[in-house]
C-alpha cells in the first residue's frame, strides 16, 4: 500500500500536472486572458532548466558533491509552478492570493515528500521549489479580473491530468531523461549519485597526497 509520502509525491507528477495546466492555458487563450501566455512561457523555461540540470549530471556527471546536488527536482519545480496558478485560476479573484499561497504550501509539502523517498536531496528540492515559486509569482502578476474557470474547463483539466498516469502507470519522465542523457553524451550508462561523491573523495585524496 502506498505511503503518505508516495501519495503526496504523485501530486507533483508532471504527467498529472502538465496536461491539466495545458487545458487551463488553452482556456486562458480562448478567453483572451493576459496570464495564459506568461504561464506557458514560464513552464517552458522551468522545464528546460530542470531538464538541462538533469542531463548535465546523468550524461556528464556535472553536479556538486558538497551540496549533494545532481539536478533540480522536477516534482518540486513543477508543483510550485503549477499548483498555485491552477488553484488561483479556479477560484474567485478576491481569494486568488490566499489560494495561491495555499498552492505554494502544498507544493512545499510535495517537494519535502521526495526526501523520505530518497529521490532527492535538500538542495535539489529547495532549488526546484524556489524556481517554481518564482515562476508562479511571475505568472500571477498578470492574473486578470475575469471569472474563474467554469466547471466544464475544470472537468477537462482533471480528465487530462488523470489520463497519463492511468493510461501509462509504469512510464516515468525520469526513464526518458536517462535515455536522452546517455544518447547525447555517448556514455554507456548514466551517472548516479554515489559516483559524484566517490569522485569528490578521490579528488580530495589526490590534493592531500604529497
Image (cartoon, rainbow, N blue to C red):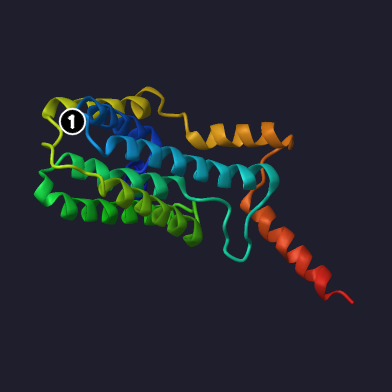
Q: Residue at x 61, y 42 (%)?
A: 55
Q: Nearer the viewer, residue 44 or 126?
A: 44
Q: Residue at x 57, y 57 (%)?
A: 69
Image quarter of residue 101: bottom left
The extreme top residue here reads 167
Task: Residue at 32%, 25% (x, y): give it.
Answer: 163
Q: Quarter holding the C terminus?
A: bottom right
Q: Residue at x 16, y 39 (%)?
A: 90
Would you place residue 158 above or below residue 124 in this image?
A: above
Residue 88 point in image, percent of width and height? 19, 45
Name, please, the residue furthest toward the right: 210
Q: Is residue 95 left or right of residue 180?
A: left
Residue 44 position within the rendered picture, expressed as x and y whole percent measured from the top left: 44, 37
Q: Which residue is mark 1?
A: 154
Q: Quadrant of residue 92?
A: top left
Q: On the rendered image, what quadrant is the N terminus found in?
A: top left
Q: Classify 169 as above or below 111.
A: above
136 displayed left or right of 101: right
Q: Position of residue 108 (x, y in %)?
A: 33, 56
Looking at the image, which is closer to me, 141 or 45? 141
Q: Secondary structure at mark 1?
A: helix
Q: Where 29 falls versus 181 (above or below)?
A: above
Dot 1, crowdedness within 10 Å: few (<14), some or many (≥20)? some
> In this rendering, does residue 57 appear at all?
yes
Residue 185 percent across, percent down from the top left: 71, 37
Amino acid at each position: 500500500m502506498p505511503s503518505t509520502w508516495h501519495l503526496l509525491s504523485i501530486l507533483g507528477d508532471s504527467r498529472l500536472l502538465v496536461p491539466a495546466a495545458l487545458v487551463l492555458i488553452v482556456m486562458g487563450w480562448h478567453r483572451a486572458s493576459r496570464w495564459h501566455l506568461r504561464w506557458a512561457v514560464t513552464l517552458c523555461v522551468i522545464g528546460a532548466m530542470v531538464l538541462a540540470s538533469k542531463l548535465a549530471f546523468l550524461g556528464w556527471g556535472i553536479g556538486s558533491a558538497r551540496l549533494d546536488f545532481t539536478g533540480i527536482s522536477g516534482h518540486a519545480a513543477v508543483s510550485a509552478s503549477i499548483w498555485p496558478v491552477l488553484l488561483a485560476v479556479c477560484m474567485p479573484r478576491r481569494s486568488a492570493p490566499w489560494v495561491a499561497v495555499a498552492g505554494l504550501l502544498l507544493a512545499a509539502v510535495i517537494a519535502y515528500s521526495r526526501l523520505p523517498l530518497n529521490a532527492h536531496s535538500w538542495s535539489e528540492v529547495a532549488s526546484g521549489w524556489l524556481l517554481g515559486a518564482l515562476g508562479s509569482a511571475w505568472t500571477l502578476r498578470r492574473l486578470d479580473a475575469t471569472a474563474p474557470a467554469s466547471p466544464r474547463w475544470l472537468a477537462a483539466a482533471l480528465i487530462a491530468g488523470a489520463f497519463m498516469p492511468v493510461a501509462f502507470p509504469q512510464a516515468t519522465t525520469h526513464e526518458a531523461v536517462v535515455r536522452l542523457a546517455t544518447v547525447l553524451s555517448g556514455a554507456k550508462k548514466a551517472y548516479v549519485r554515489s559516483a559524484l561523491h566517490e569522485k569528490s573523495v578521490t579528488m580530495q585524496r589526490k590534493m592531500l597526497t604529497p
